[in-house]
Image (tube, rainbow, N blue to C red):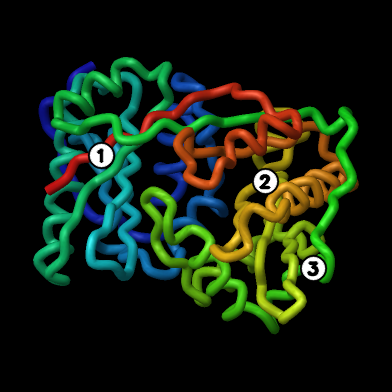
């Protein structure tokens, strides 16, 4: 079905939430990308510190005010060379390339606006599953090129988990964010500064993320070096809404990192095993994680060595301006 008349406008707040959720969930029912959401979760994403609710979200309607498409951008707050990330959803009955092109054009105009305002270099990223061949063709037709491949990996927690072994003097702790947020943020940024498409985490963002209803302090772990430095960390999470929606019992290793200067000592492996033990003790059946196939610190080899298998491939497309 092709709608000849349509309009686009900024996000208008609470009144838009349920229509966007319905669109995203309809798309997920067709695309099978595990992207379904709820009004509560969508609200949390939109309210993330650093996002411009007026300029970084856009809706496309037909003449009957039915939502046809939705686009959202994540634009890092700082950096001399930044990449904006574009997500978009178009109703399956209206996927003819026209609305998609308008969404991409909006994203490109917005990231160019950021370049002018800040006087920086910019690029735009957009991703899809390797099974979404139509979206791949569309993005390549818009002059996006594959920049990186990411794997989703999974491991059954019914299989034995090795005992974590930390180097002498390193102590495993819960992160205790209220007291340690600045030290944690410094560790996070130093751990990922040499990774592809890194953007710095802020204390404000960290505190916001940790107010999530599903946040569990016992799954947020750090290892502290003998001199008191926050050296390595593992944050695991259990998405209760997604588990209920998809009738599954899974948890995720959301972030795992070791700061420069403390690598090649077995800390990452010990932290990963500690995170897996935490998920198992919480009653989770399967652990999942995502990994950059070209991760510079050898994460893919680490995950495979403790029993993770690849189950999905995602392609990150990029367009440099």
Q: Which residue is mark 3?
A: 170
Compared across the picture, whether 29 is left or right of 164 comes to left
Asked which secondary structure carries label 3, the reply is: loop
In percent of width and height, residue 100 lies at: 21, 31
Is there a contact, CB below 8 Å, between mark 2 and mark 3?
A: no
Asked which secondary structure carries label 1, the reply is: strand
In primary-sequence order, the first of circles 2 and 3 is 3
In percent of width and height, residue 73 lies at: 31, 52
- Taking 194 as reference, is 251 above or below it? above
Q: Residue at x 50, y 67 (%)?
A: 190
Q: Residue at x 48, y 42 (%)?
A: 295
The residues tagged by marks 2 and 3 sit, at their Cα atoms, a distance apart of 21 Å
Q: Which residue is mark 2?
A: 253
Compared across the picture, whether 207 is left or right of 90 comes to right
* Residue 140 quadrant: top left
Q: Which residue is mark 1?
A: 318
Q: Can I make out residue 173 in this image?
A: no
């Amino acid at each position: 079905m092709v709608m000849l008349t349509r309009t686009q406008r900024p996000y208008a707040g609470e009144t838009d939430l349920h229509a966007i959720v319905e669109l995203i969930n309809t798309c997920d029912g067709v695309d099978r990308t595990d992207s379904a959401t709820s009004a509560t979760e969508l609200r949390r994403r939109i309210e993330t510190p650093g996002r411009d609710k007026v300029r970084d979200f856009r809706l496309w309607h037909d003449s009957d005010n039915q939502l046809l498409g939705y686009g959202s951008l994540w634009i890092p707050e700082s950096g001399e060379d930044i990449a904006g990330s574009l997500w978009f959803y178009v109703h399956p009955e209206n996927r003819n390339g026209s609305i998609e092109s308008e969404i991409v054009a909006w994203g490109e105009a917005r990231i160019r606006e950021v370049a002018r305002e800040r006087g920086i270099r910019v690029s735009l990223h957009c991703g899809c599953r390797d099974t979404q061949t139509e979206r791949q063709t569309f993005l390549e037709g818009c002059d996006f090129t594959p920049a990186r491949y990411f794997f989703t990996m999974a491991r059954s927690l019914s299989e034995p988990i090795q005992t974590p072994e930390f180097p002498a003097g390193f102590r495993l702790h819960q992160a205790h964010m209220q007291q340690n947020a600045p030290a944690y943020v410094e560790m996070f940024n130093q751990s990922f500064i040499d990774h592809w498409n890194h953007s710095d985490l802020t204390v404000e963002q960290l505190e916001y993320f940790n107010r999530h209803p599903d946040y569990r302090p016992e799954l947020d772990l750090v290892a502290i070096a003998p001199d008191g430095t926050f050296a390595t960390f593992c944050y695991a999470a259990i998405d209760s809404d997604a588990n209920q929606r998809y009738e599954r019992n899974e948890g995720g290793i959301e972030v795992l990192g070791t700061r420069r200067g403390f690598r090649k000592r077995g800390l990452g492996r010990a932290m990963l095993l500690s995170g897996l033990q935490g998920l198992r003790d919480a009653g989770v059946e399967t652990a999942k994680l995502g990994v950059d196939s070209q991760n510079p610190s050898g994460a893919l080899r680490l995950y495979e060595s403790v029993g993770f298998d690849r189950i999905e491939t995602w392609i990150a497309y990029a367009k440099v301006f």
